[in-house]
Amino acid sequence: MNTIPSPQQPVIQDLQEQEIHLRDYIRVISKRKTTVLTFLILTFLTVIITTYTATPIYTASSQVLIERNYGSSAIERGNAYIRWDPDFLTTQFEIIRSTNVARRVVEQLKLDTKYRHYFFTEQKEGLFSFLSTFKEGIKDFIKGLISSDTAEEEIDSVGNNGLLIASEPKTDADTIASIIRGNLSIKPVANTKTVIISYSDKNPAMAHLIANAIIKAYTDEILEIKLASNSYSLQWMTSKAGEERKKLEESELALQKYMRDNDLVTVENKLAVYPQKLSEFSSQLSKAQAEQKEYESLNAQIKNLGEDYKNIETISVFAKNTALQNLREKVFTAEQKIKDLSKKYGYKHPIMINAKAEHAMLIKEKKLEIDRIIESTRNAYKLAQSREANLKQLLTSTKSEMLNINERFTQYSIMKREVEMNRVLYDALSSSIKTANVTEQSQDVKIWVVRQADLPAAPSKPNKKRSLALGLILGLFGGIGLAFFIEYLDNTVKDGKDIEQRFGLTVLGSVEEIQDKNDNIETFLLKQPLSPLAENYRMIRSALLLSSPDHPPRSILITSMSPKEGKTCTTCNLARVLSQNDNKVLIIDCDMRRPRTHSLFNLPNSKGLSNYLAGYTDKGLIKQIPDEQIALITSGPIPPNPAELLQSNKMQLLMKEMLKIYDFVLLDSPPVQRVTDSLTLGTFVDGVVVITRSGKTTYDMLESGLKKMHDLHIPILGIVLNGLVKSKKDSGYYGYYEYYSKE
């Protein structure tokens, strides 16, 4: 047996993973062909009416070169490159569309006086009168909303100055300017600096007149902007130059006073000399300190030797002294002379005495020279000490003076820099004023008319061929889109394939919709037993007998989700095809709320199931259908409590007794969504057959009903699809035809 899967169980195959074929789209379009054609016809007729009743519009166009005039300024001429401005053309377009340009056109052509009647007609006739009135009403409504918001803002601002300024009413010139702006269009020409300025109007002469006037008005507006900007710039720069000149004079006077007060006439020269002096004093101090150390060491050696003149002579300063060297040579010569004379004369010989006296005199002179050198060395040491002290004092004083001059020079530099900055600003403003005076009459934007607007010979709107083609395309694709949208919103059952994919249940078969309205489906099988419709029911019978793995189901409950889905007709016709194999079939009409089975077989309903379940009688309960192996238990009189009667033990007992007599027992029950009768009877049978109707039963309704049966563990044998129209191409599997619901 097939049962609906629980919500937690995965569906057999996700619909999102299904491949969408072109034939599915064709099926939708063919199914909704009436909607597509209706939308197409209505759209096309609307376009035709609109196109052929619209007022012809003439468009006059002129081509203008618009570029920045980089050569108009002396400053810009000095640039080696031209800066790219991506917003230049967009800005010029907005200026052309501006109210100022439109007002200039009105003033030039005197449109508010000479041609006022052309823009303010007293009465309009026809369809467009209504459309224009409706359009103006919408505009007035929107303007009313905007003006109400503006009024609230103005009321909120009353407290600031105590005055409420009401907006002035629009003049005729303002209204005409708005009309001109609305009919104006600007389009740049690709890969060029030219633009096409077009004006559209119902009068070709007026379109030509205004199209050419717009160019002149735009040129005048650019020049006006330039003049106004230059005038304001000159005024501002002149005022600013006076302020900067005054600042420059004040800063120069302050600098001169500071230089005079601080004796800074040659401050820059002094500032350059002091570092040199410091360097020289530092170098001299180092030399003096070295010399002082040298003399200090020399005096210490002399002091340590005392009167030892012989060793004193070995000191470097004595050994290198020229006078002392000469004396030493003379002493040595005198000694040699004495040695030579001593060989000839005695010690008392006058020559010897003179030689010795000469030698003694030389020794004395050498000693005196040594004493002189010693004294000279001592004096040099003292002089070195004094020089070192003087150099230290000079270095200290020089550093102090340099710090002082640096402080004064810093303040001097600050004041001088301020003077230079004021001079630069003043010079720049003076130069800008001269430049502005020179270029005051030049334009920053170069405007050149490449082509004047010609008088239009033919209307530009409406383009009938294009409008009709667009109407046809719009109607066709709009209708197709509407068809798919309706199909998307249509949540009803369409074919068995979708049901099996969504719920994992077997579709036992499908029943075709009878095309001829004169035929009756209740008697169609009797009249045409070999028809495709009869074959549909035979296929349902075959699938139903194979729906249970153990044995064919004998007790079958037939129900639906809502009324009028064909469950009663399906019950009767299914009973007929089951009885064709010499099977005894019993139909029990369990719908004791709206019974209908007895009327299909033209039998009375005075006694039936309700009488039996209430315990009145069981005589005459079963009625045999003439000429058929079908028996029927009608519902009987409608009781006040059908659900309680169907839940009784007598109903179960009746089912057991009937299964002993009949091969198949079919129960025709009320819809699942309306009452609980079918859910109660579902527990007494081998399985349930759910009847759905294409285009009526929704998936939500079917899902809800199947869930109720699943919760009560009611076995579901399968689903039968009613109300289908078989397509010309058979898919090869019952129930999987391409169907269209009956309108």
Image (cartoon, helix red, strand yellow):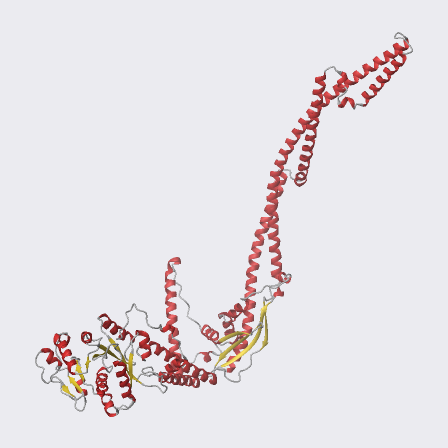
- Residue 723 position in % (x across, y down): 28, 84
Q: Residue furthest front?
A: 550
* Residue closer to the observer: 500 or 143: 500
- Residue 123 position in % (x across, y down): 40, 82
Q: Residue furthest top?
A: 348
* Residue closer to the observer: 134 or 648: 648
Res 375 visible = yes
Res 743 visible = no
**Quarter of the image holding residue 601?**
bottom left
- Residue 342 position in % (x across, y down): 89, 11
- Residue 587 position in % (x across, y down): 18, 83
Please indicate whether residue 378 sits to the left or right of residue 581 in the image: right
* Residue closer to the observer: 683 or 93: 683
Please indicate whether residue 741 sits to the left or right of residue 626 in the image: right
Question: Residue at left 46%, top 84%?
Answer: 469
Question: Which quadrant of the figure contains the N terminus?
Answer: bottom left
